[in-house]
Image (cartoon, rainbow, N blue to C red):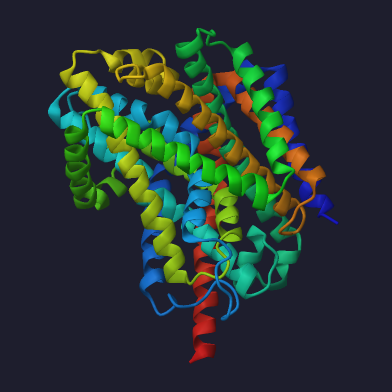
Amino acid sequence: MFSIFVFYLAVGLILVFVLWGIISPEHLAASADQAFAFTINGFGWFYLLAAFGFLIFSLYLAFSKYGNIRLGKDDERPEYSNLTWFAMLFSAGMGIGLIFWGVAEPLFHYMEPPMGLKGETVKSAQMAMRYAFFHWGLHPWAIYSVIALSLAYFQFRKGFPGLISSTFYPLLGERVNGLTGKMIDILAIIATVFGVATSLGLGTLQINGGINEVFGIPVEIRTQLLIIVIVTLLYMTSALTGINRGIKTLSNINITIAVFLLVFVLLLGPTVFILDTFTLTLGGYLQYIIEMSLSLTPFSRRTWIGNWTLFYWAWWIAWAPFVGTFIARISKGRTIKEFVLGVLLVPSLFSCIWFSVFGGMALHVEMFQGVDLAAAVQTDVTSALFLALNQLPLSMFVSIIAIILIITFFITSADSATFVLGMFSLKGTLNPSNRIKLVWGVLQSSIAAVLLLSGGLDGLKTASIVAALPFAFIMVLMCVSLRKALEAESKLLH
Protein backbone atom coordinates (compact mmCIF):
# COMPACT_ATOMS: atom_id res chain seq x y z
CA MET A 1 0.00 0.00 0.00
CA PHE A 2 1.41 3.39 -0.94
CA SER A 3 2.41 6.01 1.53
CA ILE A 4 -0.83 7.90 2.26
CA PHE A 5 0.99 10.90 3.67
CA VAL A 6 3.40 11.41 0.77
CA PHE A 7 0.86 10.78 -1.97
CA TYR A 8 -2.01 12.86 -0.65
CA LEU A 9 0.06 15.80 0.58
CA ALA A 10 1.93 16.03 -2.74
CA VAL A 11 -1.29 15.72 -4.74
CA GLY A 12 -2.98 18.29 -2.48
CA LEU A 13 -0.21 20.87 -2.94
CA ILE A 14 -0.22 20.41 -6.70
CA LEU A 15 -4.02 20.66 -6.89
CA VAL A 16 -3.87 23.96 -5.01
CA PHE A 17 -1.48 25.25 -7.67
CA VAL A 18 -3.73 24.01 -10.49
CA LEU A 19 -6.80 25.68 -8.94
CA TRP A 20 -4.83 28.89 -8.41
CA GLY A 21 -3.93 28.95 -12.09
CA ILE A 22 -7.51 28.28 -13.17
CA ILE A 23 -9.12 30.84 -10.84
CA SER A 24 -6.55 33.63 -11.09
CA PRO A 25 -3.92 33.10 -13.83
CA GLU A 26 -2.83 36.77 -13.69
CA HIS A 27 -2.13 36.60 -9.96
CA LEU A 28 -0.24 33.33 -10.43
CA ALA A 29 1.89 34.90 -13.18
CA ALA A 30 2.71 37.95 -11.04
CA SER A 31 3.64 35.80 -8.03
CA ALA A 32 5.77 33.54 -10.23
CA ASP A 33 7.66 36.55 -11.59
CA GLN A 34 8.49 37.67 -8.05
CA ALA A 35 9.65 34.18 -7.09
CA PHE A 36 11.75 34.00 -10.26
CA ALA A 37 13.52 37.29 -9.50
CA PHE A 38 14.20 36.23 -5.91
CA THR A 39 15.62 32.86 -7.00
CA ILE A 40 17.85 34.20 -9.78
CA ASN A 41 19.18 37.18 -7.82
CA GLY A 42 19.72 35.32 -4.56
CA PHE A 43 20.80 31.85 -5.68
CA GLY A 44 22.19 32.12 -9.20
CA TRP A 45 25.67 31.55 -7.84
CA PHE A 46 24.49 28.37 -6.12
CA TYR A 47 23.02 26.91 -9.31
CA LEU A 48 26.31 27.46 -11.14
CA LEU A 49 28.50 25.99 -8.40
CA ALA A 50 26.16 23.03 -7.87
CA ALA A 51 26.00 22.07 -11.56
CA PHE A 52 29.78 22.33 -11.97
CA GLY A 53 30.27 20.39 -8.73
CA PHE A 54 28.02 17.57 -9.94
CA LEU A 55 30.15 17.24 -13.08
CA ILE A 56 33.40 17.09 -11.09
CA PHE A 57 31.87 14.61 -8.61
CA SER A 58 30.62 12.29 -11.39
CA LEU A 59 34.01 12.16 -13.09
CA TYR A 60 35.72 11.62 -9.74
CA LEU A 61 33.53 8.59 -9.00
CA ALA A 62 34.11 7.09 -12.45
CA PHE A 63 37.91 7.18 -12.19
CA SER A 64 38.24 6.60 -8.44
CA LYS A 65 38.64 3.33 -6.56
CA TYR A 66 34.83 3.08 -6.55
CA GLY A 67 34.59 2.79 -10.34
CA ASN A 68 34.41 -1.01 -10.40
CA ILE A 69 31.59 -1.25 -7.85
CA ARG A 70 28.54 -2.73 -9.57
CA LEU A 71 25.06 -1.21 -9.28
CA GLY A 72 23.60 -4.47 -8.10
CA LYS A 73 25.00 -7.75 -6.85
CA ASP A 74 28.50 -8.64 -8.00
CA ASP A 75 27.23 -11.29 -10.43
CA GLU A 76 24.43 -9.19 -11.95
CA ARG A 77 24.67 -7.87 -15.50
CA PRO A 78 22.71 -5.17 -17.37
CA GLU A 79 19.10 -5.92 -18.28
CA TYR A 80 19.16 -3.87 -21.50
CA SER A 81 21.60 -3.75 -24.41
CA ASN A 82 23.76 -0.64 -24.74
CA LEU A 83 21.75 0.63 -27.73
CA THR A 84 18.39 0.24 -25.99
CA TRP A 85 19.85 1.74 -22.79
CA PHE A 86 21.11 4.83 -24.63
CA ALA A 87 17.80 5.21 -26.48
CA MET A 88 15.73 5.03 -23.29
CA LEU A 89 17.83 7.40 -21.19
CA PHE A 90 18.16 9.87 -24.06
CA SER A 91 14.43 9.88 -24.80
CA ALA A 92 13.62 10.50 -21.15
CA GLY A 93 16.43 12.98 -20.52
CA MET A 94 16.36 15.36 -23.49
CA GLY A 95 13.74 14.59 -26.09
CA ILE A 96 11.40 17.52 -26.55
CA GLY A 97 13.94 20.10 -25.42
CA LEU A 98 16.39 19.27 -28.20
CA ILE A 99 13.69 19.48 -30.83
CA PHE A 100 12.38 22.77 -29.43
CA TRP A 101 15.72 24.56 -28.99
CA GLY A 102 17.92 22.87 -31.66
CA VAL A 103 17.30 25.67 -34.17
CA ALA A 104 15.96 28.41 -31.91
CA GLU A 105 18.68 28.69 -29.28
CA PRO A 106 21.68 29.29 -31.58
CA LEU A 107 19.67 31.92 -33.47
CA PHE A 108 18.70 33.69 -30.22
CA HIS A 109 22.33 33.74 -29.07
CA TYR A 110 23.47 34.90 -32.52
CA MET A 111 21.15 37.91 -32.25
CA GLU A 112 21.70 38.57 -28.53
CA PRO A 113 24.98 36.96 -27.37
CA PRO A 114 26.12 36.81 -23.73
CA MET A 115 28.51 39.15 -21.94
CA GLY A 116 27.42 42.24 -23.85
CA LEU A 117 28.91 41.09 -27.15
CA LYS A 118 27.60 42.62 -30.36
CA GLY A 119 25.01 40.46 -32.13
CA GLU A 120 24.89 39.24 -35.72
CA THR A 121 28.65 38.85 -36.08
CA VAL A 122 31.00 35.94 -36.70
CA LYS A 123 32.00 36.09 -33.03
CA SER A 124 28.38 35.95 -31.86
CA ALA A 125 27.75 32.94 -34.14
CA GLN A 126 30.70 31.10 -32.60
CA MET A 127 29.53 32.02 -29.10
CA ALA A 128 25.98 30.94 -29.94
CA MET A 129 27.04 27.42 -30.84
CA ARG A 130 29.46 27.17 -27.92
CA TYR A 131 26.76 28.01 -25.39
CA ALA A 132 24.32 25.61 -27.05
CA PHE A 133 26.89 22.83 -26.51
CA PHE A 134 27.41 24.05 -22.95
CA HIS A 135 23.71 24.09 -22.06
CA TRP A 136 23.00 20.65 -23.52
CA GLY A 137 26.28 18.81 -22.98
CA LEU A 138 28.10 17.45 -19.94
CA HIS A 139 26.47 19.53 -17.18
CA PRO A 140 22.86 18.34 -17.56
CA TRP A 141 23.95 14.74 -17.86
CA ALA A 142 26.14 15.13 -14.79
CA ILE A 143 23.08 16.35 -12.88
CA TYR A 144 21.17 13.28 -14.02
CA SER A 145 24.15 11.03 -13.34
CA VAL A 146 24.52 12.06 -9.70
CA ILE A 147 20.96 11.31 -8.74
CA ALA A 148 20.62 8.19 -10.91
CA LEU A 149 23.84 6.75 -9.53
CA SER A 150 22.77 7.39 -5.94
CA LEU A 151 19.38 5.77 -6.49
CA ALA A 152 20.77 2.77 -8.35
CA TYR A 153 23.46 2.15 -5.73
CA PHE A 154 21.17 2.28 -2.71
CA GLN A 155 18.33 0.41 -4.42
CA PHE A 156 20.11 -2.38 -6.28
CA ARG A 157 23.26 -2.85 -4.23
CA LYS A 158 22.01 -2.02 -0.75
CA GLY A 159 18.39 -3.15 -1.09
CA PHE A 160 16.68 0.12 -0.15
CA PRO A 161 13.39 1.24 -1.73
CA GLY A 162 13.69 3.28 -4.92
CA LEU A 163 13.02 6.59 -3.17
CA ILE A 164 15.04 9.81 -3.05
CA SER A 165 14.93 9.65 0.74
CA SER A 166 16.63 6.22 0.73
CA THR A 167 19.85 7.78 -0.57
CA PHE A 168 20.16 9.72 2.70
CA TYR A 169 20.45 6.69 4.98
CA PRO A 170 24.18 7.21 5.68
CA LEU A 171 23.38 10.76 6.90
CA LEU A 172 19.94 10.34 8.51
CA GLY A 173 19.76 6.69 9.53
CA GLU A 174 16.24 5.52 10.36
CA ARG A 175 14.92 9.07 10.02
CA VAL A 176 14.62 8.39 6.29
CA ASN A 177 11.54 6.34 7.22
CA GLY A 178 10.02 9.19 9.22
CA LEU A 179 8.81 12.72 8.58
CA THR A 180 12.19 13.95 7.30
CA GLY A 181 12.33 11.25 4.64
CA LYS A 182 8.74 11.89 3.59
CA MET A 183 9.40 15.62 3.14
CA ILE A 184 12.40 14.82 0.92
CA ASP A 185 10.21 12.59 -1.25
CA ILE A 186 7.48 15.24 -1.46
CA LEU A 187 10.02 17.84 -2.64
CA ALA A 188 11.23 15.35 -5.24
CA ILE A 189 7.68 14.79 -6.48
CA ILE A 190 6.96 18.53 -6.74
CA ALA A 191 10.23 19.23 -8.59
CA THR A 192 9.47 16.35 -10.96
CA VAL A 193 5.93 17.46 -11.72
CA PHE A 194 6.96 21.03 -12.53
CA GLY A 195 10.06 19.99 -14.48
CA VAL A 196 8.11 17.57 -16.65
CA ALA A 197 5.20 20.00 -17.03
CA THR A 198 7.67 22.52 -18.44
CA SER A 199 8.73 20.06 -21.13
CA LEU A 200 5.16 19.06 -21.88
CA GLY A 201 4.31 22.73 -22.29
CA LEU A 202 7.26 23.25 -24.64
CA GLY A 203 6.21 20.20 -26.63
CA THR A 204 2.65 21.48 -26.87
CA LEU A 205 3.80 24.89 -28.09
CA GLN A 206 6.01 23.34 -30.75
CA ILE A 207 3.38 20.86 -31.95
CA ASN A 208 1.05 23.84 -32.35
CA GLY A 209 3.78 25.76 -34.20
CA GLY A 210 4.44 22.79 -36.47
CA ILE A 211 0.85 22.13 -37.46
CA ASN A 212 0.45 25.86 -38.02
CA GLU A 213 3.35 25.87 -40.49
CA VAL A 214 2.29 22.65 -42.22
CA PHE A 215 -1.53 22.72 -42.05
CA GLY A 216 -2.35 26.34 -41.18
CA ILE A 217 -3.98 25.52 -37.83
CA PRO A 218 -3.79 28.70 -35.72
CA VAL A 219 -1.40 29.14 -32.80
CA GLU A 220 -3.73 29.79 -29.86
CA ILE A 221 -4.42 28.54 -26.37
CA ARG A 222 -7.50 26.53 -27.38
CA THR A 223 -5.47 24.54 -29.87
CA GLN A 224 -2.76 23.98 -27.29
CA LEU A 225 -5.22 22.70 -24.68
CA LEU A 226 -6.69 20.31 -27.24
CA ILE A 227 -3.17 19.05 -28.06
CA ILE A 228 -2.56 18.43 -24.35
CA VAL A 229 -5.78 16.42 -24.06
CA ILE A 230 -5.03 14.27 -27.12
CA VAL A 231 -1.41 13.58 -26.21
CA THR A 232 -2.37 12.87 -22.59
CA LEU A 233 -4.66 10.08 -23.82
CA LEU A 234 -1.83 8.71 -25.93
CA TYR A 235 0.83 8.71 -23.22
CA MET A 236 -1.51 7.30 -20.59
CA THR A 237 -2.25 4.41 -22.95
CA SER A 238 1.49 3.84 -23.26
CA ALA A 239 2.08 4.20 -19.51
CA LEU A 240 -0.50 1.58 -18.66
CA THR A 241 1.30 -1.02 -20.83
CA GLY A 242 4.45 -0.95 -18.65
CA ILE A 243 8.13 -0.14 -19.13
CA ASN A 244 9.10 -3.14 -21.25
CA ARG A 245 6.41 -2.51 -23.83
CA GLY A 246 5.34 1.14 -24.03
CA ILE A 247 8.46 3.04 -22.94
CA LYS A 248 11.03 0.64 -24.44
CA THR A 249 9.27 0.48 -27.80
CA LEU A 250 8.68 4.23 -28.03
CA SER A 251 12.28 4.99 -27.04
CA ASN A 252 13.61 2.87 -29.89
CA ILE A 253 11.16 4.56 -32.28
CA ASN A 254 12.30 7.99 -31.01
CA ILE A 255 15.96 7.37 -31.59
CA THR A 256 15.30 5.91 -35.05
CA ILE A 257 13.24 8.93 -36.18
CA ALA A 258 15.70 11.37 -34.57
CA VAL A 259 18.69 9.82 -36.36
CA PHE A 260 16.77 9.83 -39.66
CA LEU A 261 15.94 13.52 -39.25
CA LEU A 262 19.52 14.29 -38.24
CA VAL A 263 21.02 12.50 -41.25
CA PHE A 264 18.44 14.02 -43.61
CA VAL A 265 19.36 17.58 -42.58
CA LEU A 266 23.09 16.80 -42.52
CA LEU A 267 23.11 15.41 -46.07
CA LEU A 268 20.66 17.84 -47.69
CA GLY A 269 21.80 20.89 -45.74
CA PRO A 270 25.21 22.63 -45.82
CA THR A 271 27.13 19.45 -44.93
CA VAL A 272 30.69 20.80 -44.93
CA PHE A 273 29.66 23.92 -42.99
CA ILE A 274 27.92 21.73 -40.37
CA LEU A 275 30.97 19.49 -39.95
CA ASP A 276 33.30 22.50 -39.69
CA THR A 277 30.95 24.06 -37.14
CA PHE A 278 30.94 20.89 -35.03
CA THR A 279 34.74 20.67 -35.00
CA LEU A 280 35.27 24.36 -34.17
CA THR A 281 32.58 24.46 -31.50
CA LEU A 282 33.64 21.26 -29.78
CA GLY A 283 37.15 22.68 -29.38
CA GLY A 284 35.83 25.98 -28.01
CA TYR A 285 33.43 24.22 -25.65
CA LEU A 286 36.16 22.06 -24.13
CA GLN A 287 38.58 25.00 -23.96
CA TYR A 288 36.21 27.36 -22.16
CA ILE A 289 34.07 24.92 -20.17
CA ILE A 290 35.37 26.05 -16.76
CA GLU A 291 34.98 29.74 -17.57
CA MET A 292 31.41 29.23 -18.80
CA SER A 293 30.59 27.04 -15.79
CA LEU A 294 31.35 29.87 -13.36
CA SER A 295 30.27 32.95 -15.33
CA LEU A 296 28.04 35.52 -13.65
CA THR A 297 27.70 39.26 -14.31
CA PRO A 298 27.66 41.03 -10.91
CA PHE A 299 29.28 44.20 -12.26
CA SER A 300 27.24 44.74 -15.41
CA ARG A 301 23.93 43.39 -14.01
CA ARG A 302 23.12 41.73 -17.32
CA THR A 303 20.24 39.22 -17.31
CA TRP A 304 21.42 36.86 -20.05
CA ILE A 305 22.88 34.24 -17.69
CA GLY A 306 19.68 34.17 -15.64
CA ASN A 307 17.44 33.84 -18.66
CA TRP A 308 19.48 31.07 -20.24
CA THR A 309 22.13 29.22 -18.21
CA LEU A 310 20.38 29.42 -14.84
CA PHE A 311 17.08 28.44 -16.44
CA TYR A 312 18.70 25.39 -17.96
CA TRP A 313 20.49 24.32 -14.78
CA ALA A 314 17.24 24.68 -12.84
CA TRP A 315 15.31 22.81 -15.53
CA TRP A 316 17.76 19.89 -15.42
CA ILE A 317 17.64 19.84 -11.61
CA ALA A 318 13.84 19.86 -11.68
CA TRP A 319 13.95 16.97 -14.13
CA ALA A 320 16.61 15.13 -12.13
CA PRO A 321 14.34 13.17 -9.73
CA PHE A 322 12.31 11.85 -12.66
CA VAL A 323 15.13 11.23 -15.15
CA GLY A 324 17.49 10.03 -12.43
CA THR A 325 14.99 7.50 -11.10
CA PHE A 326 14.21 6.28 -14.59
CA ILE A 327 17.90 5.96 -15.55
CA ALA A 328 18.57 4.12 -12.28
CA ARG A 329 15.72 1.72 -13.05
CA ILE A 330 17.21 0.77 -16.44
CA SER A 331 20.87 0.70 -15.30
CA LYS A 332 20.90 -2.21 -12.87
CA GLY A 333 24.00 -4.36 -13.23
CA ARG A 334 26.38 -1.75 -14.66
CA THR A 335 29.56 -0.66 -12.88
CA ILE A 336 29.88 2.90 -11.60
CA LYS A 337 32.54 3.70 -14.21
CA GLU A 338 30.50 2.19 -17.05
CA PHE A 339 27.40 3.99 -15.85
CA VAL A 340 28.96 7.46 -15.46
CA LEU A 341 30.86 7.39 -18.75
CA GLY A 342 27.82 6.05 -20.61
CA VAL A 343 25.42 8.60 -19.15
CA LEU A 344 27.85 11.53 -19.51
CA LEU A 345 29.56 11.01 -22.84
CA VAL A 346 27.18 9.35 -25.32
CA PRO A 347 24.11 11.59 -24.83
CA SER A 348 26.31 14.70 -24.57
CA LEU A 349 27.99 13.88 -27.87
CA PHE A 350 24.63 13.26 -29.53
CA SER A 351 23.33 16.61 -28.22
CA CYS A 352 26.38 18.41 -29.61
CA ILE A 353 25.94 16.73 -32.99
CA TRP A 354 22.25 17.66 -32.97
CA PHE A 355 22.96 21.35 -32.35
CA SER A 356 25.73 21.34 -34.95
CA VAL A 357 23.35 19.98 -37.57
CA PHE A 358 20.22 21.99 -36.80
CA GLY A 359 21.80 25.10 -35.29
CA GLY A 360 24.56 25.09 -37.88
CA MET A 361 22.04 24.76 -40.72
CA ALA A 362 19.96 27.62 -39.29
CA LEU A 363 22.99 29.91 -38.92
CA HIS A 364 24.06 29.12 -42.47
CA VAL A 365 20.60 30.06 -43.74
CA GLU A 366 20.71 33.28 -41.69
CA MET A 367 24.26 34.36 -42.51
CA PHE A 368 24.83 33.18 -46.09
CA GLN A 369 21.47 32.55 -47.78
CA GLY A 370 19.84 35.92 -47.11
CA VAL A 371 16.88 34.51 -45.15
CA ASP A 372 16.04 36.50 -42.00
CA LEU A 373 15.36 33.40 -39.93
CA ALA A 374 16.41 34.90 -36.59
CA ALA A 375 13.83 37.72 -36.71
CA ALA A 376 11.07 35.23 -37.49
CA VAL A 377 12.19 32.99 -34.62
CA GLN A 378 12.16 35.91 -32.18
CA THR A 379 8.57 36.59 -33.20
CA ASP A 380 7.45 32.96 -32.78
CA VAL A 381 10.00 30.60 -31.25
CA THR A 382 7.73 27.57 -31.71
CA SER A 383 8.08 27.84 -35.51
CA ALA A 384 11.91 27.86 -35.51
CA LEU A 385 12.48 24.26 -36.53
CA PHE A 386 9.85 24.32 -39.26
CA LEU A 387 11.00 27.63 -40.74
CA ALA A 388 14.50 26.16 -41.01
CA LEU A 389 13.24 22.91 -42.55
CA ASN A 390 11.37 24.96 -45.16
CA GLN A 391 14.75 25.85 -46.64
CA LEU A 392 15.43 22.19 -47.51
CA PRO A 393 14.07 19.91 -50.25
CA LEU A 394 10.99 17.84 -49.30
CA SER A 395 10.24 20.36 -46.54
CA MET A 396 6.59 19.28 -46.13
CA PHE A 397 7.58 15.63 -45.70
CA VAL A 398 10.38 16.29 -43.23
CA SER A 399 8.23 18.76 -41.24
CA ILE A 400 5.60 16.06 -40.75
CA ILE A 401 8.34 13.67 -39.62
CA ALA A 402 9.49 16.33 -37.12
CA ILE A 403 5.95 16.72 -35.74
CA ILE A 404 5.71 12.95 -35.28
CA LEU A 405 9.06 12.99 -33.46
CA ILE A 406 7.90 15.74 -31.11
CA ILE A 407 4.75 13.78 -30.31
CA THR A 408 6.64 10.54 -29.63
CA PHE A 409 9.18 12.36 -27.44
CA PHE A 410 6.26 14.02 -25.63
CA ILE A 411 4.66 10.63 -25.01
CA THR A 412 7.91 9.02 -23.86
CA SER A 413 8.79 11.82 -21.42
CA ALA A 414 5.31 11.94 -19.91
CA ASP A 415 5.07 8.14 -19.88
CA SER A 416 8.41 7.83 -18.04
CA ALA A 417 7.40 10.55 -15.59
CA THR A 418 4.11 8.86 -14.64
CA PHE A 419 6.09 5.68 -14.04
CA VAL A 420 8.59 7.45 -11.77
CA LEU A 421 5.96 9.44 -9.87
CA GLY A 422 4.14 6.17 -9.35
CA MET A 423 7.33 4.70 -7.87
CA PHE A 424 7.67 7.66 -5.48
CA SER A 425 4.04 7.22 -4.42
CA LEU A 426 4.31 3.46 -3.88
CA LYS A 427 7.38 3.38 -1.62
CA GLY A 428 9.79 2.83 -4.49
CA THR A 429 8.14 -0.18 -6.09
CA LEU A 430 9.49 -1.06 -9.54
CA ASN A 431 5.97 -1.67 -10.86
CA PRO A 432 3.57 1.09 -9.72
CA SER A 433 -0.16 0.51 -10.11
CA ASN A 434 -2.07 1.85 -13.11
CA ARG A 435 -4.38 3.81 -10.81
CA ILE A 436 -1.51 5.86 -9.39
CA LYS A 437 0.05 6.40 -12.82
CA LEU A 438 -3.30 7.64 -14.10
CA VAL A 439 -3.55 10.22 -11.31
CA TRP A 440 -0.06 11.55 -11.99
CA GLY A 441 -0.60 11.60 -15.72
CA VAL A 442 -3.66 13.82 -15.41
CA LEU A 443 -1.95 16.13 -12.87
CA GLN A 444 1.14 16.57 -15.10
CA SER A 445 -0.98 17.66 -18.02
CA SER A 446 -3.06 19.93 -15.80
CA ILE A 447 0.05 21.73 -14.58
CA ALA A 448 1.28 22.18 -18.17
CA ALA A 449 -2.10 23.62 -19.17
CA VAL A 450 -2.15 26.02 -16.20
CA LEU A 451 1.37 27.25 -16.94
CA LEU A 452 0.45 27.91 -20.56
CA LEU A 453 -2.67 29.78 -19.46
CA SER A 454 -0.82 31.94 -16.95
CA GLY A 455 2.38 32.79 -18.78
CA GLY A 456 3.18 30.72 -21.85
CA LEU A 457 6.89 30.10 -22.35
CA ASP A 458 7.90 32.54 -19.59
CA GLY A 459 5.59 30.77 -17.15
CA LEU A 460 7.12 27.40 -18.01
CA LYS A 461 10.67 28.70 -17.47
CA THR A 462 9.77 30.37 -14.18
CA ALA A 463 8.14 27.21 -12.80
CA SER A 464 11.29 25.17 -13.44
CA ILE A 465 13.67 27.63 -11.80
CA VAL A 466 11.60 28.11 -8.66
CA ALA A 467 10.65 24.44 -8.17
CA ALA A 468 14.26 23.30 -8.59
CA LEU A 469 15.82 25.43 -5.84
CA PRO A 470 15.04 23.28 -2.76
CA PHE A 471 15.87 20.12 -4.63
CA ALA A 472 19.27 21.50 -5.65
CA PHE A 473 20.24 21.61 -1.96
CA ILE A 474 18.96 18.06 -1.55
CA MET A 475 21.18 16.90 -4.43
CA VAL A 476 24.29 18.41 -2.85
CA LEU A 477 23.62 16.50 0.36
CA MET A 478 22.89 13.38 -1.70
CA CYS A 479 26.46 13.54 -3.06
CA VAL A 480 27.81 13.71 0.49
CA SER A 481 25.70 10.71 1.49
CA LEU A 482 26.75 8.62 -1.53
CA ARG A 483 30.42 9.38 -0.95
CA LYS A 484 30.06 8.28 2.67
CA ALA A 485 28.37 5.01 1.69
CA LEU A 486 30.96 4.20 -0.98
CA GLU A 487 33.82 4.87 1.42
CA ALA A 488 32.25 2.56 4.00
CA GLU A 489 31.90 -0.23 1.40
CA SER A 490 35.45 0.32 0.20
CA LYS A 491 36.78 -0.19 3.73
CA LEU A 492 34.80 -3.43 4.07
CA LEU A 493 36.16 -4.75 0.77
CA HIS A 494 39.74 -4.00 1.76
Where in the figure is residue 257, as x and y percent of width and height? 46, 37
Instruction: Describe residue 297's horizontal placement relative to residue 15 as left or right.
Output: left
The quadrant the N terminus occupies is bottom right
Is residue 375 at all visible to an observer of this figure? Answer: yes
Q: Nearer the viewer, residue 463 or 245?
A: 245
> Looking at the rendering, which quadrant does residue 437 occupy?
top right
Give the image location of residue 468, x and y in percent.
54, 43
Looking at the image, which residue is at 55% across and 45% down?
A: 251
User: Residue 148's quadrant in the figure?
Assistant: bottom right
Seen at 76% across and 52% down, the residue is 432
Q: Residue at x 49, y 77 (%)?
A: 69
Look at the picture and state if 38 lies above or below 479: above
Q: In this view, does 207 lie above or below 215?
A: below
Q: Left or right: 419 with respect to 83?
A: right
Q: Where is residue 465 in the image (x, y as percent from the top left)?
A: 50, 37
Q: Where is residue 41 in the image (x, y as percent from the top left)?
A: 42, 36
Residue reaching furthest to the left: 122
Q: In this view, does 377 lie to the left or right of 130?
A: right
Seen from the viewer's position, the closer of residues 280 and 14 is 280
**Identity of the residue drawn at 52% across and 64% down:** 149
124 in relation to 477, above or below:
above
